[in-house]
Image (cartoon, helix red, strand yellow):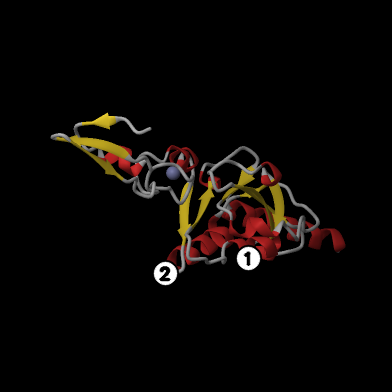
Amino acid sequence: MAAKKSKFNARIQNRGFSQIVLQGNNELTANANKPIRCSFCHGNHTVNSKNCEKQAMYKHGAMLYKLSLNDDEVRKSLRTRIKMTMPLKREWVTENVFSRIDKRFYRSNLIIHEACPISGLSPTQFDGMNFCISFLTQNGDVDHDGNHIWVGGDVMTTLVSTTTVKPKYVFDKTVVMMEGWVSRTTLQTLTQELTEMEAKGRM
Ligand SMILES: [Zn+2]
């Protein structure tokens, strides 16, 4: 039973409740609006409002890329970030990890935690790196089955090119430099030194 009020309350309406408004001797029933649902966390607010606390939480110490069909520039800048400027773990792995992921994750919002170069391959290509990522659920929580998993460049390529009508949120956490990571310029120097050392060793 809806509460009887003498004043119409728009907020109640937007939460999806109907209300009975007293007007003179008449009771008017105002039907509920379709509740507002955030496209990021499914909460009762619009996605761009300050009320989206989950989005604000992930944005903290991260760069947000909002991939959408009608803005290819965002996708391009994320790709450039990954190939050219994203710092890398100062440790080389020898192979690609998880070249397949659960299909449902391809539409999920995600966090990029860190990237690691693959030895013998160029990290200026997606294929030359592995990535530690987490997928988010429709409610904006970290998905238990997709929490800090490592994927190869081929998966990453698909993840950042998936373009659905619904925008995809990608949080790049590598903007805050961590211990054990190197910048791309440092990496270049290291690789060069390594190659020279190897060349000398062969003589
Ligand atoms: Zn929200």
Task: Using the rendered view, name the quadrant where residue 28 is placed.
Answer: top left
Residue 190 drawn above or below residue 2: below
Residue 33 seen in render: yes
Q: Amino acid at mark 1?
A: Thr
Q: Earlier in the sequence, mark 2 or mark 1?
A: 2
Q: Looking at mark 2, is its residue's CB closer than 8 Å to ligand 1?
A: no
Q: Which residue is mark 2?
A: 70
Check disc 1 and report its element: helix, strand or loop.
helix
Q: Amino acid at mark 2?
A: Asn
How far apart, in angstroms, are the residues tagged by discs 2 and 1?
Answer: 18 Å
Residue 38 in the image, given as x and y percentages of width and height? 43, 48
Say the numbered circle drawn on residue 142.
Answer: none
Residue 37 in the image, given as x and y percentages of width and height? 42, 48
Task: Using the rendered view, name the quadrant where residue 173 is placed.
Answer: top right
Report the side of 179 relative to 35 (left or right): right
Quadrant in the picture for the N terminus: top left
Q: Nearer the viewer, residue 72 or 41?
A: 41
Quadrant of picture, ligand 1: top left
Residue 124 seen in render: no
Say the numbered circle drawn on residue 158.
Answer: 1
Name the residue located 49 percent from the left edge and 64 percent from the top edge: 75
Labels in figure, total: 2
Residue 36 in the image, given as x and y percentages of width and height? 38, 47
Q: Outermost residue, right direction? A: 202
Q: Nearer the viewer, residue 156 or 196?
A: 156
Q: Outermost residue, front direction? A: 25
Residue 34 in the image, given as x and y percentages of width and height? 38, 50
Label 2 crowding class (10 Å Cα cut-off): few <14, some 14-19, many 20+? few
Name the residue located 40 percent from the left edge and 48 percent from the top edge: 47
